[in-house]
Image (cartoon, helix red, strand yellow):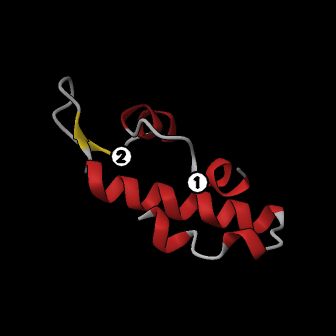
Amino acid sequence: MLPVILYGCKSWSTTLADEHKLRVFENKVLRKIYMPKRDEVTVECRRLLNEELHGLYDFPDIVRIMKS
């Protein structure tokens, strides 16, 4: 996923809005990969929170990789 998204990022001049869009895209992809979780108490499926997603995905976020 990252090589395709970050192709040519060394020449980008990004704004905060661009960084936000990259984070939103990364979260959407991670939600597709990790699927909704079933809550044991209410037996309903729920969406993972951003902190839970990044806890499962053990890599730095996309903006930190882009800036390095």
Residue 3 horizontal/vertical position (percent): 48, 67
Q: Quadrant of the N terminus?
A: bottom left
* Amino acid, disc 1: Ile
* Amino acid, disc 2: Arg
Q: Which mark is residue 36?
A: none
Write the residue at 77% across / 75% down: 11
Picture quadrant where residue 53 is located = top left
Residue 9 horizontal/vertical position (percent): 68, 70
Q: Badge 2, how many Cα within 10 Å: few under 14, some, many 20+?
A: some
Q: Is residue 16 above or below residue 43?
A: below
Write the residue at 71% across / 61% down: 19
Mark 2 or 1: in front is 1
Instruction: Give the residue pinned by disc 2.
Output: 47
Q: Is residue 50 above or below residue 33?
A: above
Instruction: Give the residue pinned by disc 1.
Output: 62
Frontmost residue, 61 versus 33:
61
The mark that comes first in sequence, 2 or 1, is 2
Picture quadrant where residue 14 is located = bottom right
Distance of label 2 from label 1 (alpha carbons): 21 Å
Residue 45 horizontal/vertical position (percent): 23, 44
